[in-house]
Every structure is written in structure tokens, then in C-alpha cells.
Amino acid sequence: MLRLRSSIIARLLSSSPATSPASPLRRLLSVSAVAPAISPSARFAAEDYLVATCGLTRPQALKAAPKLSHLKSPTNPDAVLAFLAGLGLSGADVAAVVAKDPQLLCAKVEKTLGPNVAELTGLGLSRPEIARLVPLAGATFRCRSIISGLQYCLPLFGSSENLLRALKSGSVLGADLERVVKPNVTFLQECGLGVCDIAKLYVIRPSLLSISTERIRTAVACAEGLGVPRRSQMFRHALQAVAFLSEEKIAAKVEHLKKAFRWSDAEVGIAFSKAPALLMRAKESLQRRSEFLISEVGLQPAYIAQQPAIVCYSLEGRLRPRYYVVKFLKENGLLMRDPSYSTVFKKAEKVFREKFICPYKEAAPHLEEDYDAACKGEIAANFRFT
């Protein structure tokens, strides 16, 4: 047993950054390396083991230790740590994984972890990718169900790299594949979403594939009721906006949109069908944009309903600075004709500068400087002409 623990410590130390030889984990592992062998009759001190060997903080160990209370010796945890070190996990990685799922130390290497890694390799994952998967998969990594989950999810996300990136948002691997995930994906496909759309939706709303299909049906009906039909270009975005809102909250948000922008029910539907993200905005944020666009810029509510994307732009970082540039140019007779504010606000930053700033550097040498300051929130009373 002592030889096994020494091997574990050597692997974890070698995988720790060379630039920090005096790290707490390194010191703790070094101490445990010279610790005397544990007597078979001695009680396994889980909390001390988690701190000294796994690198957890004392509060983390205090929380995790009860889940290891049934262990009589460090034999199995030692084997798991050696296995993780062999996969290439660093000491910090191991500490994070064990803190998140202490029961991983109870998993059987020969019966579960080893076969899982072998089959994951057979699915095309490299060992570094498997090492990245360990903390992302959580408790599912120590379950045999991870194999069927990966077999299904890899084609859905297109590649192991795409899947690993998506799993950072939440793990679908822990959901019931046959009763939840597959029916949800099938229903979303019936609604016109392709696998790429579903993968993108998952990144923003990872729980969407783990909830009941009935809840997804309710969300779809809600999106349709707000004017976004299935198979439309904005359907995915609409589903993303309403998926976890109750009918009461949606109704309240619709009422606020009507009040803030002076919209009718029909105009709310038009706006939502073009910019579903409106429903995800805070009331205060919408109110400030309404006051600016209607009261200061002078746009008509009906116009905003037809061009709702402008409501989703940053007020201080985009809308105000661009409005002040155009206002300055108009007041000083530098624009040949009034531009559409929808165009002004929607243009990419580079294009906006090329059209509204660069041509006027000689006539208004401070314009770019004032615009840059405005984008940082430093709005001057007036842009300088000379």
C-alpha cells in the first residue's frame, strides 16, 4: 500500500506546475510521502486524507468527508488517484474533481473507470480529451452510462471538441438518455431545429435537454403564441427566451414592453418575432432604452417595433455614442442627408467608423477622440468641432 501511495504522490507531483515547487498541494503530498504505513486496524481519517493527499482545503474536506465515511482504508482512493494521475490530471485538477464528486474515490478502477476510459478511447477521444472530460462529466464519469451518452452526443455536437466546449455550460450526460434526452431532441427536430441549432441552444440553455418533453412543448406553444412559428429563422432564439419563464412572468414582461415602448399587442408580436431576446432584458434596461430612443432620438414606437434589434444593443457603449456622432455631423452641416438610425445603430463598428468618422477627420479633428471617449461612458456636453 505504501508503494502505491508513493507512486500516486510521484505522479501528482510530476503533473503539478514546475514553477511552483512550494505549492501547498506539493508540500502536503510530500508530507504524506514520508508518512508511516497505516495499520489495518486504524480508522481511515477521510478528512485528513482529502487535505493531505487530494489537496482539498479544510472546509472542502469537512464537507466531502461524510461521503467517504464507509471507507475503512485508503486503498481504493489511492488506486483512483493513481488512475487520474495516469490520465494526466494535475494535482489542482484532482483536487477540483474530488471536491466536486468525493464519491469518485470510491469508484472501482478495474470494474468501472478503466473500462470507461477504454471505451471512450474507442469512441475517438484522446487521453487529453478524456482528462478534460473528467471534471465536466462530474459523477457521470464513474458510471457506465457515460458511454451510451457519449455515443449519442458526439454526433449531435459534431465533434469531441465541440462537445467538451458545450459541457462547460452544463452536463447533459447525467440526464436519462432514453426517457429524456432522446425524446427532447426528436421533438426539437420535429419543430424544425437541426442538430447544429440544438447544440447552440444547449450551450445557452443546457437544462433544456434535461427537462421533460412536456415542458418543452409548453415553451414551443408559448413561442408560437408570441408570433414565432416553428421552422422560422428566429424559433431557436424564441425558445431560448421563453423556455424557463412561467406564463405569469411572460405576461408581465409583455405588459412592460407595451407600456415602455407604447406598443400594441400586435407590435409586441412583431418586435418579439424579430428579436426574441427582448423578453430576456431587465425592466430597468428596457425603460432606459425606451426613454432614449423615443424621447431623445425621437423614434416612433412603430418604427422601433419594426427594428427591435436596436433595443438589444448597449445603450452607453453603442447607441448614445453613435447618436451623438450623427447629431454632431447634422448640426454642423457635414451630412448630405439624414441616415436611418436603424442603419446607424446596426452597422459593424469598423463600417460605422469608415462611414461616419473617417471622412470628417479634417473638418472635425476631435470627432474620433470624442467618440472613443463616449464609448467608454465619458459623454461630453457637446462634441468638439475645432
Image (spheres, grey):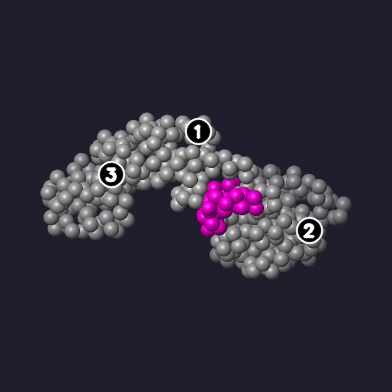
Q: Residues within 10 Å of mark 1 (few under 14, many from 20)?
A: few
Decide if residue 33 is on the left or right side of residue 197: right
Marks 1,3: beta carbons within 8 A = no
SS assignment at label 3: helix
The residue pinned by badge 2 equals 108
The residue pinned by badge 1 equals 249
Per the model, the C-alpha gap separating discs 1 and 2 is 47 Å
Residue 163 at x, y percent in the picture: 58, 59
Question: Is residue 262 something that shows in the picture?
Answer: yes
Q: Amino acid at mark 2?
A: Lys
Per the model, the C-alpha gap separating discs 1 and 3 is 30 Å
Q: What's the residue at 28%, 37% (across, down)?
A: 300
The boundaries of the magenta stretch are: 181-208
Examine the image and state in which quarter residue 31 appears: bottom right
Decide if residue 145 is on the left or right side of residue 252: right
Which label number is shown at residue 320?
Answer: 3
Q: What's the residue at 24%, 59% (across, down)?
A: 354
Residue 234 at x, y percent in the picture: 45, 49
The residue closer to the viewer here, 55 or 283, is 283
Is 269 above or below relative to 61? above
Q: Residues within 10 Å of mark 3 (few under 14, many from 20)?
A: many
SS assignment at label 2: loop
Question: Is residue 314 something that shows in the picture?
Answer: no
Is 149 above or below relative to 263? below
The residue closer to the viewer here, 171 or 113, is 171
